[in-house]
Image (spheres, rainbow, N blue to C red):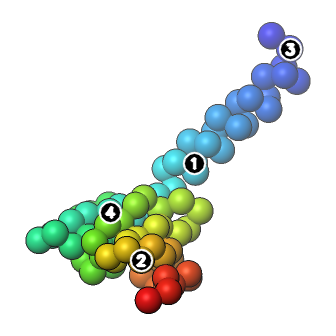
Amino acid sequence: MNASKFFPIFALTVLGAITVGAATLFPAAVDGRCGFIDKTGVFSINPQFDEAMDFQNGLAQVKNGRSVGYVDTAGKYVWNPAK
């Protein structure tokens, strides 16, 4: 295989692995409420949502009732749903 063709594929594979491994908070539920824990299992964002999705590009989709919004890794709404 030509090295000039191999390198871009290798670089994309490595960058993809770094991006996937970059997740630092994970959705977790307690008593029917969802929040986010770190890799040690400690809640970084307290359980306060009906549903929570994985973080992607620094934001996670959350849902309360019929309202859907996005929070950052500090738990602050960056797009707050209309109430």
Residue 27, disc: 4
Q: Amino acid at mark 1?
A: Ile
In this rendering, would 30 be left or right of 68?
A: left
Q: Secondary structure at mark 4?
A: strand
Q: Residues within 10 Å of mark 1 (few under 14, many from 20)?
A: few
Q: Secondary structure at mark 3?
A: loop
Q: Quadrant of residue 79?
A: bottom right
Per the image, the residue denoted by label 2 is: 67
Q: Amino acid at mark 2?
A: Ser
Looking at the image, which residue sits at the far left? 31
The answer to whether residue 22 is visible is: yes
- The image shows residue 13, relative to residue 1, as above or below, that is below
Residue 2, disc: 3
In this rendering, would 9 be left or right of 19?
A: right
Say which label, 3 or 1, has the lower sequence index.
3
Q: Residues within 10 Å of mark 3 (few under 14, many from 20)?
A: few
